[in-house]
Image (spheres, rainbow, N blue to C red):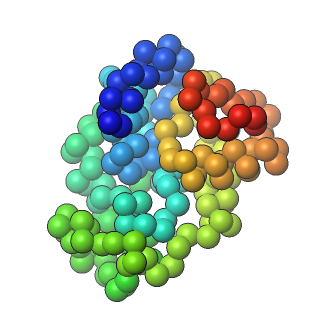
Amino acid sequence: QGLDQVRSQRATAESLQVDLVITSPLRRTLQTATGLFPRHPNMVAHEALREGVSESCNLRLPVEEVAVKFPEVDFKMISKGEDPHLYRFEPPFPQGALGPEEYKKLTRMDCRVDETDEEMAARAEEAIALVAARPERAIALVSHAMFLHALIVTLRKGAPQGIKLRKGPHDPYADY
């Protein structure tokens, strides 16, 4: 169903004529970004755009694994190896402890330290600073509902000069 939604919005996304696509490094947003902007020459992943960390589905795969599946995305801004939030899950997993099958076994009950609203707000500020520092003028952010909410709340408090939001056709937020 999700891939059908992406295909149905591809023409709209391509009509935006963005200079840069910044995406979350989680697999589902990478699928969305590459589906909406196929063959886009300037697509990067950034950890700040990831979903809030409270469920195992919001952990990312090791960069070395996901970069092979999404060669059109630049992962230079993502730290190598496993998800840096893996420590939040029970039992505490040492670096390199999990393979792909072990990741699949994690459940919501395994999360022992949810990401706080303050931590997510700090990531929103990091994403805003990233966008403000980029030379490109039209930038698409491909992220997740919880993070986008935090981003919009942060922008409502005062966006840096030059940053303007353009709502998509299915934007759940009626008013910025």
User: In the drawing, does residue 110 fall left or right of residue 16?
Assistant: left
**Residue 90 placement: quadrant:** bottom left
Residue 175 to residue 60: above or below: above
Instruction: Give the image location of residue 99, x and y in percent.
Output: 19, 68
- Residue at the bottom extreme, as displayed: 91
**Residue 100 placement: quadrant:** bottom left
Residue 104 to residue 141: above or below: below
Give the quarter of the figure containing the N terminus: top left
Q: Residue at x 31, y 81 (%)?
A: 94
Q: Residue at x 57, y 24 (%)?
A: 169
**Foreground pick, 160 / 29:** 29
**Residue 109 placement: quadrant:** bottom left
**Foreground pick, 164 / 107:** 107
Give the quarter of the figure containing the C terminus: top right
Q: Residue at x 65, y 52 (%)?
A: 150
User: In the drawing, does residue 44 fall left or right of residue 1?
Assistant: right
Q: Residue at x 30, y 58 (%)?
A: 61
**Foreground pick, 4 / 65:** 4
Instruction: Give the image location of residue 43, x and y in percent.
Output: 42, 33
Asked if residue 15 can be seen in this view, the reply is yes
Instruction: Give the image location of residue 112, x and y in percent.
Output: 46, 81
Instruction: Give the image location of residue 134, x and y in percent.
Output: 60, 35
User: In the drawing, does residue 5 fall left or right of residue 157?
Assistant: left
Asked if residue 40 can be seen in this view, the reply is no
